[in-house]
Image: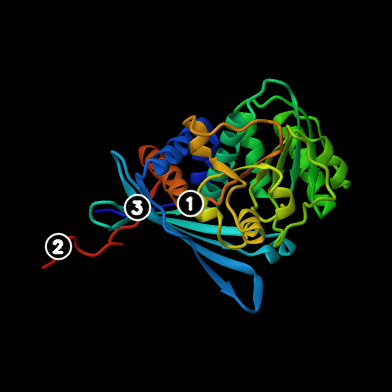
Amino acid sequence: MSFHVIDATVAQEVIAASPATILELVRDTYLQHSAGATVNPNSYFLRFPEQPTCRIIALPAHLGGEQPVSGLKWIASYPPNVARNLPRASAVLILNDAETGYPFACLEASGISAARTAASAALAVETLAPSDRPRTVLFVGAGVIGRTVSDFLAARDLAVAECLVHDHVDAYAQTFAGYLRATHDWSAQAVTDIDSALATADLVVLATTAPAPWLGDAQTLRPDQLILNLSLRDVHPTVMIKCHNVLDDLDHCLTAQTSPHLTEIEYGTRDFIDGTLADVLLGRVRVYPDRPIVFSPFGLGVLDLAVGRHIYRVAREQGRATEIPAFLPEPTRW
C-alpha cells in the first residue's frame, strides 16, 4: 500500500491540459449518479456563530463502476479572505480504496472543485442552450469560479460576441475582463449597471458569494436566456417560479437555503422543477426556450471523486505524485 500527495501546481496543470476529458468525466458521472451507481450523502456544514458567513463543508461520496473509488472533499469557504487578497475557498480531497477503505491519496482540491463546477456549467450550456450563434455572456462575480468557467467555455469553443463582467468591486471586474481579453481573445468589458447587463445577456454566469437572493422581479430576464446559478443563492423565489429549472440533484439542491430550496419553502411545491441535467441528457425531460432556464448545481461529491481520480492517475503516470513513505501502518494485522 502507498500514499501519495498531489499539490496544487500538479493538479492545476493536469486540469488545464484535459478540459475535454474532465467534461466527459462529469457527464458520465451525472449519468452514473442518475442510474444509482453512486453513493452521495448530504453534505455536512460546519458553521461558526462568530463568523456567520464562513463554513467548512464535508462532501463524502462513493463512485461505483468498473473502477470504484470512495473519498471525502473537505472545503472551506471564507468570504472575508477576499479582503485579505486570499482566495475564498481552500480544499483537500482524500481518495480511499473501495475494497479496503484505506486512503491512498490526498490532493489539493480547490482547483478540482472549481474545475468540476466549471465543467458542469459548460455541459449545461451545451445541453440546455445548444447554439452556434455568438452570444453575449455576463459574468456576475469575478473570482476563481467565474474564471474557470470561462476557461472551460473557451475550451469548448463557445461562440462569444461579447463578455460583460460585474462585481461589487469594480477593480476585480476590470481585472477579470482583462483576463478574458488576453487569455481567450474575447471582447470583454466591466459593467456597473447590472440590470441593463442582465437584460441583454444570452448566458448569465452567477458566481458570487451572496448569502441571500438579490436577483428579483426588478430585473428583466428574457425567455431564451440560460442562467447558470452556480453560487446557488442569487435568484429570488419569485423569479425561480417563473423559469424552467434544472438541477444536478433534487434532494441536494433543496437544502441549505439555496434558491431552489427557498422557492420550495415559499410556494410549498416542487412543481417548478423540470428535472435534472441527467434527465435532459437522457431525453427524459425536454426544456423549451419559452422561459428563462436556470441551472442550479449543488455540487456533488462524486464529481470531485471523478476529477480527482483522473488527476491522481495522470500524476502517477507522469511521476509527479509525491509518495509519503510509511504514512500507512504495516499492512498486516499481526
State the CA–CA distance, disc 2 to disc 1: 30 Å
- Tell me the crowding category of disc 2: few under 14, some 14 to 19, or many 20 or more residues within 10 angstroms, Cα based: few
Position of residue 106 in the picture relative to residue 202 (left or right): left
State the CA–CA distance, disc 1 to disc 3: 20 Å
Q: In terms of sequence position, does the residue under pointer 2 or pointer 3 come before the other?
A: 3
Residue at the disc numbered 2? 332
Asked which secondary structure carries label 2, the reply is loop
Position of residue 62 in the picture relative to residue 119 (left or right): left
Residue 92 got which mark? none
Q: How is the image coloured?
A: rainbow
Evaluate whether residue 308 shows in this view. Answer: yes
Residue at the disc numbered 1? 7
Q: Nearer the viewer, residue 124 or 290?
A: 290
* Residue 240 rendering spot, x and y as whole percentages: 69, 49
State the CA–CA distance, disc 2 to disc 3: 22 Å
Quarter occupied by the N terminus: bottom left
Asked which secondary structure carries label 3, the reply is strand
Quarter occupied by the C terminus: bottom left
Residue at the disc numbered 3? 70
